[in-house]
Amino acid sequence: SRDNPVFYVQYAHARICSVFRNAVEDLGEAVASPTSLSEADFALLNDDSEIAVIKRLSQYPRLLEGAAATREPHRVAFYLYDLASDFHALWNKGKESPHLRFILLNNEKLSIARLALLRAIRYVLSNGLHLLGVRPVDAM
């Protein structure tokens, strides 16, 4: 549950892995490939919650530097929890508003942009969990 921060962050990682499995099923393997995602048009991401996640992701390198310099690893844990919260909020918005779903069968370019954003979130969650000595999971 949200009360267990490690579970909450791992659950976000597992959910993202699930989205990628569904993307391959719905849109084909080419859409979820690193090559396809590297060509994503991030300008298509214009919802406030998507922009907020992008801003949070941009803080990660500086956060790591500060946490290491001050020997405060809890900063990483708090950041990962906040990033997981942002992701779960995106997930919930997509459930409430179909046009905000990660996979849109009628809009491959937007799907690719959203999958690229999820790939970045998954990378940061995985990296941060590894730094804290926790193994990210692909399914729960």
Image (cartoon, rainbow, N blue to C red):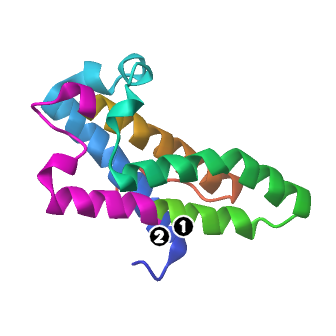
Q: Residue furthest bottom?
A: 3
**Relative to 77, does residue 17 appear above or below in the rendering?**
above
Camera-side residue of 134 and 99: 99
| Residue occupied by mark 2 | 7
Q: Is residue 31 left or right of residue 39?
A: left
Say whether residue 53 is left or right of residue 26. right
Residue behind mark 1: 81
The disc, 1 or 2, on the residue closer to the chain's N-terminal end is: 2
- Quadrant in which the N terminus is drawn: bottom left
**Magenta stretch: residue 13 in it?**
no
Q: Quadrant of the C terminus?
A: bottom left
Residue 41, horizontal then vertical, whole percent = 37, 26
Q: Considering only vertical position in the picture, is 79 above or below 24?
A: below
Q: Secondary structure at mark 1?
A: helix
Label 1 crowd (10 A; few <14 / some 14-19 / many >=20):
many
Q: Residue at x 22, y 49 (%)?
A: 100
Q: Classify 10 Å Cα crowding around label 2: few (below 14), some (14-19), many (20 and above).
A: some
Left or right: residue 77 versus residue 93 is right
